[in-house]
């Protein structure tokens, strides 16, 4: 992707971000949480077109986020992963940041907000490809693993992270180690391998192994796959 598109991407994200800052209660001693949720816009991702499947993934996501135990000062980042050369991948519903603050956005508001965001995925036009590794890499400037507990949820059946060539899964790697300070961070794929029809029963397990290796090589502490 050329430099002009990269600059436009950065400007667009800045324009769509929502940050609330106001007086808040006493800050807890525990580190704050930063959660990123990436929705894969590839046409092969059933979360865009299958309402029943989308509801199941929504329930999983809400449960996972509630288990984190969000509180004031925590931040939630919403992103989409599509064709990085198209500005249409930056759907205004999803590409934003929300920080919880006293008398503004409450942590308890998030579950219902997530259900609303997830429902709106049905209105986003699917794209021919999704550069998932690139999209995750863009989070390097938005999260701070050294000072926060970080969890990244990827809503994808996973195979869009790369390509299936001659029955084998291949995927790009991150440039360098952009998440070198994220050894305690978790990456959780929700729906990985779901709705995949292939004559190779080992394709999904092999893809999980490769995806896990690529993400831990970038610096993440653990990669989980749930479906």
Image (cartoon, rainbow, N blue to C red):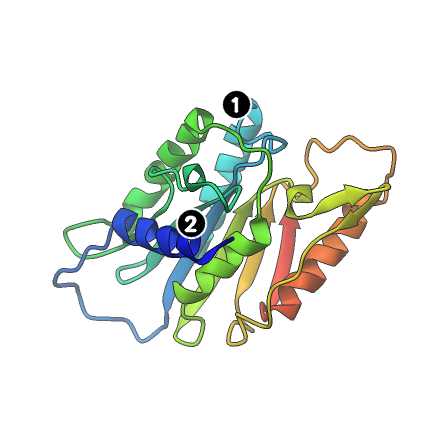
Identify the mark at residue 69; answer none if there is no mark: none
User: If you read the primary sequence from the N terminus, does the residue marked by circle 1 or circle 2 appear first?
Assistant: 1
The residue depicted at 32 percent of the width and 60 percent of the height is: 74
Residue 224 position, x and y percent, is: 63, 55
Q: Is residue 84 left or right of residue 29?
A: right
Distance in Å between CA atoms under marks 1 and 2: 22 Å
The residue depicted at 36 percent of the width and 51 percent of the height is: 8
The residue depicted at 60 percent of the width and 29 percent of the height is: 46
Name the residue nearer the viewer: 18 or 119.
18
Residue 181 position, x and y percent, is: 51, 76
Q: Name the front one of labels 1 and 2.
A: 1
Residue 172 location, quadrant: bottom right
Q: Is residue 97 left or right of residue 220?
A: left
| Residue of label 1 | 51
Name the residue nearer the viewer: 109 or 164.
164
| Residue of label 2 | 66
Residue 56 location, quadrant: top right
The residue depicted at 59 percent of the width and 67 percent of the height is: 175
- State the SS at label 1: helix
Do tag 1 and tag 2 residues touch (Cβ < 8 Å)?
A: no
Quarter the C terminus occupies? top right
Residue 93 position, x and y percent, is: 34, 37
- State the SS at label 2: helix
Q: Residues within 10 Å of mark 2 (few under 14, many from 20)?
A: some
Where 73 falls versus 135 (above or below)?
below
Residue 5 position, x and y percent, is: 42, 51
Q: Residues within 10 Å of mark 1 (few under 14, many from 20)?
A: some
Where 77 falls versus 25 (above or below)?
above
Number of disc labels: 2
């Amino acid at each position: 992707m050329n430099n002009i598109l990269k600059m436009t991407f950065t400007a667009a994200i800045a324009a769509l971000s929502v940050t609330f800052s106001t007086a808040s209660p006493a800050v807890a001693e525990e580190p704050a949480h930063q959660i990123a949720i990436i929705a894969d816009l590839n046409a092969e991702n059933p979360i865009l077109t299958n309402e029943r499947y989308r509801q199941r993934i929504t329930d999983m996501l809400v449960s996972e986020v509630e288990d984190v135990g969000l509180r004031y000062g925590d931040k939630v980042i919403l992103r989409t992963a599509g064709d990085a050369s198209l500005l249409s991948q930056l759907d205004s519903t999803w590409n934003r940041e929300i920080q919880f603050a006293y008398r503004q956005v409450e942590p308890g508001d998030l579950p219902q907000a997530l259900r609303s965001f997830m429902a709106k995925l049905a209105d986003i036009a699917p794209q021919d490809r999704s550069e998932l590794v690139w999209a995750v890499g863009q989070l390097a400037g938005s999260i701070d693993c050294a000072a926060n507990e970080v969890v990244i949820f990827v809503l994808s059946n996973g195979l869009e992270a790369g390509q299936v060539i001659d029955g084998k899964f291949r995927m790009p790697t991150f440039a360098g180690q952009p998440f070198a300070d994220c050894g305690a961070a978790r990456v959780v794929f929700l729906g990985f391998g779901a709705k995949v029809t292939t004559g190779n029963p080992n394709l999904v397990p092999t893809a999980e192994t490769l995806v896990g290796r690529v993400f831990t090589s970038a610096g993440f502490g653990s990669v989980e796959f749930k479906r």
